[in-house]
Amino acid sequence: MVLSAAETAAVVRLAHEERVAVTPRGLGTGLAGGSVPVQGGILISTELMNRVLEVDANNLMVRTQPGVRTAHLQQACAEPGLYYPVDPASLDDCSIGGNVATNAGGARAYKYGVTGDYVRGIEAVLADGSIIRYGGKLHKNVTGYDLNKLLIGSEGTLGIITEIIFKLVPKPRYQVDVLVPFNRIEQGVELCLRVIRDSRLMPAVVEFIEQGGIAACNQVLGTCLPFADAAVQVLIELEGNDRQQVLNECVLLGETAMQLGAREPLVADNPTDQERLWTARRSIAKTLKQIYPQVTAEDIVVPLAELPATVELVAGLQQKYGVPIVPFGHIGDGNIHVDICRTISDDADWQRVRSAVVDELVDLVLARGGQITAEHGIGSAKRHLMKRALGPAELDVMRRLKHALDPEGILNPGKVLPEQE
Ligand SMILES: Cc1cc2nc3c(=O)[nH]c(=O)nc-3n(C[C@H](O)[C@H](O)[C@H](O)COP(=O)(O)OP(=O)(O)OC[C@H]3O[C@@H](n4cnc5c(N)ncnc54)[C@H](O)[C@@H]3O)c2cc1C
């Protein structure tokens, strides 16, 4: 465990001299195996670099060490009335440095964007042990190549992030969550699309929870989601500084939902009810893992217009292969988590079915202009899919970047880039 950039640099310099692999690790919640040292060597944990260094209300910026938990950073910013809005479902357990390294998203990405949209400055240790600092408390900056963007989402393969400056935004005064149940999944998808395209509303959240996710939450946590028999529930959060305007928007949303055949929505307009809903939403992935012995978590993203066909396709895969396949998540961003749950005891049979589902899913998503991951990253788990997801020219640029910054290949080897023939 390291305590500072200088200490990190000293370890990496030695590893560079000795040609030893170095794997950076935040809090280990990543879903792509990114912080697992698959080729051995040194694991550098930032867990003890856990101080928020400065909340600068004058400049709307926060400066932090990478090991700070995301929820803790949000709380520190909320004290002077500021808002760091990126909220991965794992926010109580993951580190902000891990969020930068994976460019994590969350439920509020529909309105507020993802981690990288807030990064204004980064300090990082490179593979030779040198330390770079780029950016600062600047809302705009185009001085040279954007080294922040190079490191954002690089999954610990280009540098180890030791300090970050994020921009902050003001938090709207009122938030109302509306949970809309439907008997048919396509009705729920259509509501999301109408809200996004036609309603002129700007919700913070447009999420959906299909029956398998609702059942898992209720089974593990007790009945925390109403409408247990709904085929899908759409969770929409409306917000603003004018309470009456937010309530008017809720009415408009309710009317649109009822036109599509929704059942009576649930409106959560106080912290207790909202916390109950959000606890359930954030627990879907965890509860599925408690019910099934193994869950393969896919993280596809498609253009918005492809959502209805994609959701139908996932339902078709479940029928075809006879294993539970639970879609849920950030539908407003075109990003659907597809959790393939193991119900087959024989190892070889399970591997065969799992690979067939993933193969078919990936083919269809790519054919529709989508991609294989929107926020979980490639790590070691999706590396084998990279040659299908990207062309040789793009992969070649990535290899050259990696080679320029890490010629010995010591930083997080076995991640992101596919094996070369
Ligand atoms: C229940 C659950 C819900 C989740 N929900 C979401 C979600 O809503 N949105 C989302 O985006 N993700 C989600 N995730 C995935 C995960 O929480 C994120 O990827 C998170 O950003 C990982 O942070 P971490 O600190 O755990 O990083 P780790 O898992 O430790 O590492 C992740 C990657 O980042 C690299 N890394 C970590 N720290 C550094 C550093 N300081 N410098 C350089 N590289 C570093 C590692 O090498 C690795 O490649 C979820 C995970 C779980 C278990």
Image: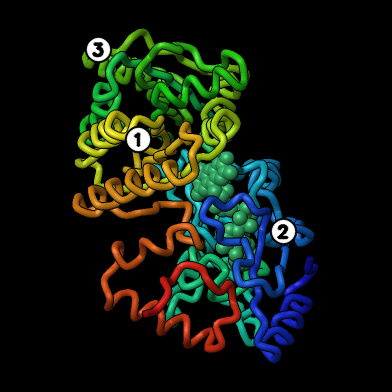
Residue 38 percent across, percent down from the top left: 60, 67
Q: Residue at x 63, y 41 (%)?
A: 81
Quarter holding residue 335: top left
Vertical order, 364 against 15 (above or below): above
Q: Amino acid at mark 1?
A: Met
Quarter holding residue 410: bottom right
Determine whether the residue tagged by mark 1 lies in a helix, strand or loop.
loop
Please name the residue that numbered disc 1 is placed on. Answer: 202
Please name the residue that numbered disc 2 is placed on. Answer: 54
Q: Residues within 10 Å of mark 2 (few under 14, many from 20)?
A: some
Q: Nearer the viewer, residue 350 or 81?
A: 350
Q: Residues within 10 Å of mark 3 (few under 14, many from 20)?
A: some
Q: Amino acid at mark 3?
A: Gly
Mark 1–mark 3 distance (CA, rounded to whole Å):
22 Å
Mark 2–mark 3 distance (CA, rounded to whole Å):
49 Å
How many marks on residues?
Answer: 3
Q: Nearer the viewer, residue 152 or 372?
A: 372
Q: Residue at x 53, y 65 (%)?
A: 155
Please indicate whether residue 388 sits to the left or right of residue 60 in the image. left
Residue 15 percent across, percent down from the top left: 70, 84
Mark 1–mark 2 distance (CA, rounded to whole Å):
31 Å
Residue 384 percent across, percent down from the top left: 40, 63
Q: Amino acid at mark 2?
A: Glu
Image quarter hosting the C terminus: bottom left
Please name the residue that numbered disc 3 is placed on. Answer: 261
